[in-house]
Amino acid sequence: MNLVNLMDPQQQVSFTEAVKIGLGRNQGVFFPQNLAQIEDVNALLAMPFQARSSRILQHLIGDELPSDTLDAMVKSAFNFPAPLVEVESGTYCLELFHGPTLAFKDFGGRFMSECISLFNQGERVTILTATSGDTGAAVAHAFYGKENVDVVILYPKGKISLAQQKLFTTLGENIHCFAVDGSFDDCQALVKQAFLDDEVKSQLGLNSANSINISRLLAQVCYYFEAFAQLTDSQRKQVHVSVPSGNFGNVCAAMIAAAIGLPIKKLSATTNQNDTVPRYIETGNWSPNATLESLSNAMDVSKPNNWPRVESMLNGRSFSKDDFYSCSVSESRTQEVMKKINQLGYIAEPHTAIAYEGLRLNQAENETGIFLATAHPAKFKESVEGVLEQQLEMPEVLATALAKPCLAESMSADYEGLKKRLFEKLVS
């Protein structure tokens, strides 16, 4: 697989190199030069989830990984389902929260863990990542206890739910967490600075587990095929998919799925009040505002890392601009939609409600609609119970995490301060 740095096209690397590097020169993300179509998608959709996912990843990655090795990696990483649930006639919710940390990022985090473990061959590696909520838990659990791997997680202090926070700040051992006084974009900026620091990169063996990393992105392609596999042949012909979007990795994975042959007719990348992309599509001006806090905090991103990948696909006509929608949903409307979905007999947390609203605004009568549930409602227990005025049942994994003490350290959004702490903790 040949990948190019979108900010420095002269930097071209293999899949293995891209996974190990994480972020390219000039803070560029890696992306495939070519996305060839799969010949018989219907035959692929008839396969079981794990076998199909292995075939999809083999198609994308090429011959860098032996098929039996990739089969074992997928079997280990994707050991939980992704059910498609009918919420109302012609509209389905793809539930991506059945993994160990109850969020869609378990797919990418666990596959990336398999890749890093294989590619680094015992060399010391430090995973440095910023999280707006769910990435932290998925990455922490995927790498927890792994030999020769340290994980450093930065998160905006007081701006993610308690359940999200406790899932990764209570582990300890090789998981190191910092509560940063600032926004997610501040955390993300610190990560990017570290990747530009040759001393830090060389001494710590730095890598990132954000959707910057190509292994996480490609893993996410697989569950879009799983959604279609659960539809009838006639339903697959006119499918509109709505993705709650913050860093835009998830919708980028959907576009890759479409580019290699999955018949997605339309895509909605729906944001909360942090509306950089909807405004850009409407005006042509890229003008990020200060990040606003929202009920859907995992999407509180004003400078999405994956937008260059999405834009390259739109400009390269891998996916039609005419079939790509992006709108923002206000805080008040998010709450109204949560209540509406609840009246249909389904409980949706804020991110899922935003995806539903994006679908509702753009779905035609003859289209089958799929909106993504990216997290279990109980991960946002306080906000969901407050809006719906009903009690949620707490999954055991969350109840256990909530009972443990937080081990995170507080820090300012200062790079030199972060660097000092990294060296104190990780350099012997």
Image (cartoon, grey):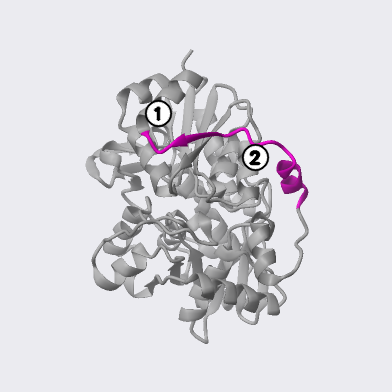
Above-or-below relation of 168 to 333: above
The residue that mark 1 highlights is 417
Kindly state the secondary structure of the residue where label 1 is placed.
helix
Res. 123 visible in picture: no
Identified by mark 1, the residue type is: Gly
Q: CA distance from mark 1 to mark 2?
A: 37 Å
The answer to which of 415 and 88 lies nearer the viewer is: 415
Around disc 1, counting alpha carbons within 10 Å, would you say few (fewer than 14), some (14 to 19), or many (20 or more)? few
Residue at the image position 61 percent from the left and 37 percent from the top: 169
Around disc 2, counting alpha carbons within 10 Å, would you say few (fewer than 14), some (14 to 19), or many (20 or more)? some
Q: Pick out the residue farthest to the bottom.
A: 365
Above-or-below relation of 31 to 141: below
Q: Which mark is residue 4?
A: none
Residue 67 is inside the magenta segment: no
Q: Earlier in the sequence, mark 1 or mark 2?
A: 2
Q: Which mark is residue 76?
A: 2
Identified by mark 2, the residue type is: Ser
Find residue 379 and report its image quarter. bottom right
- Viewport quadrant of the N terminus: top left
The answer to which of 75 and 144 lies nearer the viewer is: 144
Q: Position of residue 127 (x, y in %)?
A: 48, 32
Camera-near label (1 vs 2) is 1
Find residue 312 and report its image quarter. bottom left
Q: Position of residue 373 (x, y in %)?
A: 60, 63
State the extent of the magenta-drawn residues as a range. Answer: 395-414
